[in-house]
Image (spheres, rainbow, N blue to C red):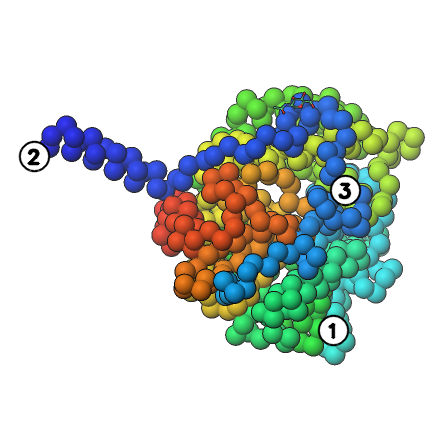
């Protein structure tokens, strides 16, 4: 028999079941980054650094903060024992993507001038003196009528630069200094039973891995870089998901997003006139990604700001660039956090497979240490899914580390580090020794058991 109360409790249960597949979105903290007035007018860059790798903290787009021995907080080792670590970070600094370069570039990028920048580390785990040292050399054919002014110089676009290799090496050294030397958790030699490195099919992640693994395990050779088949790779991520695309489209239809494009259109007109980019080119005008990458890549390598190819006195100014950089930050925050529940819908579907794998590793570690070399897309989706309190554009080398600790009473706890410090989530609070079950439940509510929501919603 159904009385009113039973029906009510049934309805509540049903509502809860429905919600379980979409854990609720909690707004991020209001900062300058997600303040549209600040993005538009500034002034300045709120202390964010874009012009070299030298100073890391608190935010350096060229070389983001990561785990290192001077800031790493060691928990009470009488109480906690480290069981498993999973590092995920964006590759280090590089040349711009070809699609983000001006139709005619006034600068050349040189990658052959220093032997360290050769494309050698691409496929063989090298930076290694003992293997046959083959490498790529970018060279145009004078007989190829299709060459573009863009491609003058001797780099691929993208390619990790000399500075990017140096930063990758330093990153590996710092990680080993903490998990090897300080905690005695990592062995001195690489072994596949204990350690796994994962890359994407984009070779820049392999280049970074070549330098970073060399720094971590200088006495090891032949280190495999695991890569999933393209098309289903969860790290990039590269599997298709129309439902995720439509969540993203919803964000792009919001008033806030439209307003920012309106406010920044004056700047777009001015930059198009200098760059020669077609004002009707959607790729350059649906967001600030292209100009952002074009300028930040130059600044990270002390390459002067671009000028009009036809009028060398008409150059991009400091204030132009600062506005582009602020819009870039604002957009990342909007697309991944401020845009509301669609941001979480987008990240849970796009990154749900990766997160499901992560949860599997935490529940039953198959190695001690796993290390994923990814992209800004990988990072921002993880940050979005964990509902980071202050979203930023994850710059070069930006890092999330998930640690699994076992307590003396046998219970397990998860600590998540963003840029070497405990991450704060708007939804879960400080991710500092969160009970494993709580963390697993949060992720599983997002993805469904075994990523079943992703499989279902993405149409697999
Ligand atoms: C946004 O930034 C502007 C300009 O700096 C400031 O006046 C305003 O108070 C900020 N708004 C919020 C919500 O912080």
Write down the residue under mark 3: 50
Report the side of 24 relative to 184 (left or right). Answer: left
Residue 162 point in image, percent of width and height: 80, 58
Q: Total marks drawn?
A: 3
Alpha carbons under labels 1 and 3: distance apart = 31 Å
Q: Earlier in the sequence, mark 1 or mark 3?
A: 3
- Give the percent coordinates (x, y) of residue 309: 87, 35
- Residue 47's x, y, as percent? 74, 37
Whole-Å distance between the Cαs marked 2 and 3?
Answer: 67 Å
Q: Between residues 299 and 275, which one lies in front from this camera angle?
A: 299
Element class at badge 1 = loop
Q: In which image quadrant can residue 101 be found?
A: top right
**Picture quadrant of residue 168:** bottom right
Query: Can residue 185 be seen?
Result: yes
Q: Which residue does the image show at 39% across and 53% down from the upper left?
A: 437
| Residue that label 2 marks | 1
Q: Residue at x 86, y 34 (%)?
A: 307
**Which mark's residue is nearer the viewer, 2 or 1?**
2
First of labels 2, 1 by sequence position: 2
Badge 1 is on which residue? 128
Label 3 C-beta lies within 8 Å of the nearest ligand 1 atom: no
Residue lying farthest to the bottom in this orientation:
130
Q: Which quadrant of the picture is home to ligand 1?
A: top right
Pick whichever, 382 or 403, lies toward us.
403
């Amino acid at each position: 028999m159904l009385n009113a109360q039973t029906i009510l409790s049934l309805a509540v249960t049903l509502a809860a079941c429905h919600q379980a597949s979409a854990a609720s979105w909690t707004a991020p903290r209001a900062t300058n980054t997600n303040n549209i007035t600040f993005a538009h007018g500034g002034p300045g860059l709120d202390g964010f650094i874009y012009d070299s790798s030298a100073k890391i903290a608190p935010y350096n787009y060229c070389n983001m903060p990561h785990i290192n021995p001077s800031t790493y907080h060691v928990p009470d080792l009488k109480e906690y024992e480290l069981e498993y670590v999973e590092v995920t970070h964006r590759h280090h600094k590089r040349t711009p993507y070809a699609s983000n370069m001006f139709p005619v570039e006034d600068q050349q990028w040189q990658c052959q001038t220093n032997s360290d920048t050769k494309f050698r580390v691409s496929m063989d785990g090298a930076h290694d003196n003992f293997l046959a040292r083959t490498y790529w050399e970018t060279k145009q054919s004078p007989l190829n009528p299709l060459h573009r002014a863009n491609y003058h110089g001797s780099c691929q676009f993208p390619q990790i630069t000399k500075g990017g290799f140096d930063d990758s090496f330093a990153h590996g050294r710092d990680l080993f200094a903490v998990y090897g030397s300080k905690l005695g958790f990592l062995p001195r030699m690489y072994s596949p039973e204990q350690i796994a490195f994962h890359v994407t099919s984009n070779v820049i992640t392999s280049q970074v891995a070549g330098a970073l693994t060399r720094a971590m395990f200088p006495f090891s050779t032949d280190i495999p870089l695991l890569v999933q088949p393209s098309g289903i790779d969860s790290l990039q991520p590269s599997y298709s998901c129309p439902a995720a695309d439509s969540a993203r489209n919803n964000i792009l239809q919001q008033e806030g997003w439209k307003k920012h494009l309106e406010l920044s259109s004056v700047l777009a007109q001015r930059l198009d006139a200098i760059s020669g980019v077609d004002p009707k080119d959607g790729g350059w005008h649906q967001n600030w990604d292209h100009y952002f990458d074009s300028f930040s890549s130059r600044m990270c390598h002390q390459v002067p700001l671009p000028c009009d190819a036809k009028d060398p006195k008409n150059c991009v100014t400091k204030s132009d660039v600062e506005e582009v950089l602020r819009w870039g930050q604002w957009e990342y925050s909007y697309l991944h956090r401020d845009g509301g529940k669609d941001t979480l819908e987008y990240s849970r579907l796009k990154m749900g497979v990766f997160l499901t794998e992560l949860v599997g590793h935490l529940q039953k570690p198959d190695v001690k240490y796993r290390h994923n070399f990814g992209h800004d897309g990988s990072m921002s989706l993880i940050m979005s899914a964990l509902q980071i309190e202050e979203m930023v554009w994850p710059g070069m080398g930006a890092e999330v580390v998930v640690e699994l600790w076992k307590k003396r009473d046998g219970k397990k706890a998860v600590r998540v580090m963003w840029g070497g410090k405990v991450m704060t989530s708007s939804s879960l609070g400080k991710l500092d020794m969160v009970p494993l079950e709580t963390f697993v439940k949060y992720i599983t509510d997002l993805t469904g058991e075994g990523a079943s929501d992703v499989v279902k919603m993405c149409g697999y």
